[in-house]
Image: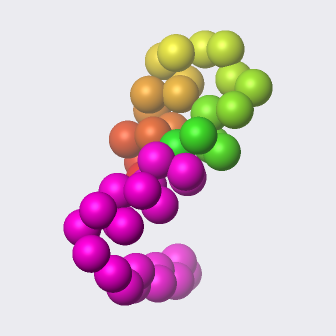
Amino acid sequence: MFHVEKTEGSKEKKYELLLKQIDALTEGEPDMIANTANASAL
């Protein structure tokens, strides 16, 4: 089973964290379709 942690903070902080996660997830992957699929999974 997956464990999802609730993030605390303002909406701005949540989006800031999301952008950092997307950057880390897509780093080094040249395939735009793979990057889009991975980002949408977040």
- On the rendered structure, is 41 left or right of 12? right
Which residue is at the far right? 28
**Where is residue 8 shown, x and y percent of the image?**
37, 85
Q: Does 10 sit left or right of 16 as displayed?
A: left
Residue range of the region highlighted in magenta in the rendering = 1-21
Q: How is the image coloured?
A: rainbow
Residue 39's image quarter?
top left
Residue drawn at (46%, 84%), measured in percent from left and top?
5
Return the residue found at the far left.
11
Q: Is residue 31 above or below residue 20?
A: above
Which quadrant of the structure image shows residue 27?
top right
Where is residue 11 shown, x and y percent of the image? 24, 67
Of 20 and 41, nearer the camera is 20
Which residue occupies 59% across, 40% down?
23
Percent across and percent down for residue 40 are 38, 41
- Looking at the rendered image, the quarter that the N terminus falls into is bottom right
Residue at 69% x, 23% y is: 29
Camera-side residue: 10 or 33? 10
| Up/down of 20 relative to 28, above or below | below
| In this view, 34 is above or below 18 | above
Does the magenta run of residues contain 8?
yes
Is residue 8 left or right of 26 when viewed as pictured? left
Residue 6 on image: x %, y %: 39, 84
Q: Which residue is more in the foreground, 38 or 14? A: 14
